[in-house]
Every structure is written in C-alpha cells, then in structure tokens.
Image: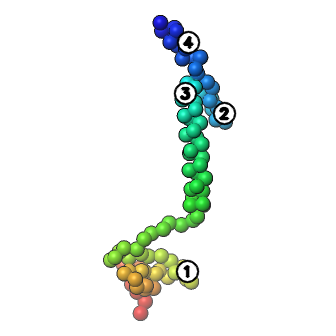
Amino acid sequence: MAGKTSKRKHERARMLRFGSVAMRVNADDLVERIQNVRRGQASLEKMTCELLEPGVKIRARKDVPLFFADPADPRRIVRELNGEREIGSFENGKFKARV
C-alpha cells in the first residue's frame, strides 16, 4: 500500500525551477506556488517607488522635538518643537539655541 501511495504521489510531482534552484512539488502545490510568486512580484512592483525614495518620514508629535541638520549650513542644528523652529547646536549633550 505504501508503494502505491508513493507512486501516485510521485506521478503528481512536478519540478519547479527558480534560477539554479530546483525542487519537486505536488502539482497542486505548484499552481499555488506560482500564484504566490506572481502575487509577491506584483507587490514588490507596487513598492518599488517607495523603496527607491531616500529618507525616513517622521511625524511630529506634541512636546517631542525633532532635530535635523540645517540645509543651508550642515554644521548647524534645527530643532522643531510644537510648531516652532530654533537653530542652534549641541553643547555638553544638550541643545542650545542661538540668540
């Protein structure tokens, strides 16, 4: 009985190849795997624009300062806090605004 089961299973098996990788899968699984690969490729295609755009988007929150380099002079630091911007620098680990 085990021989018949394995023979039947072997008859339904197909070779699936991706580049240099090959594996034997059931015919039913093969259709599902191909569909999953296509879905994954479609998702990746949709994300490509987002992945290629440099930078990180950080949303400002109340009472949480955001620090970044001044675009005009990268040696200066800009602090945004509750809608206000201050230019300054860090001294002894603390932000000090220019007067």
Q: Residue at x 42, y 80 (%)?
A: 80
Which of the 4 image quadrants contains residue 29? top right
Real-space CA distance between mark 2 and mark 4, rounded to the nearest whole angstrom? 27 Å
Look at 41% across and 93% down and name the residue there.
Answer: 99
Residue drawn at x 32%, y 77% as measured from the top left: 63
Q: Position of residue 56 (x, y in %)?
A: 50, 66
Crowding near pointer 4: few (<14 within 10 Å), some, many (20+)? few
Mark 1 → mark 3, Cα distance in angstroms: 57 Å
Marks 3/2 in contact by CB < 8 Å: the verdict is no
Per the model, the C-alpha gap separating discs 4 and 1 is: 69 Å
Instruction: State left or right for residue 89 relative to residue 64.
Output: right
Label whose residue precedes the other's in the sequence (4 or 3): 4
Foreground tag (4 vs 1): 4
Q: Residue beneath label 2, please?
A: 20
Give how far across and how far down residue 5 sits, in percent. Answer: 50, 12
Question: Residue beneath label 1, please?
Answer: 71
Q: Secondary structure at mark 3?
A: helix
Counting from the top left corner in percent of width and height, residue 2 is at: 48, 9
> In the image, what residue type sits under mark 3?
Asp
Badge 4 element = helix
Indicate the secondary structure of the residue bearing disc 1: loop
Of badges 2 and 1, nearer the viewer stands 2
What x and y, as percent, mark residue 64?
35, 74
Q: Amino acid at mark 1?
A: Pro
Say what amino acid the circle numbered 2 marks. Ser
Look at mark 4 in the image and give the residue it sits on: 7
Q: Nearer the viewer, mark 2 or mark 4?
A: 4
Q: Residue at x 62, y 30 (%)?
A: 16
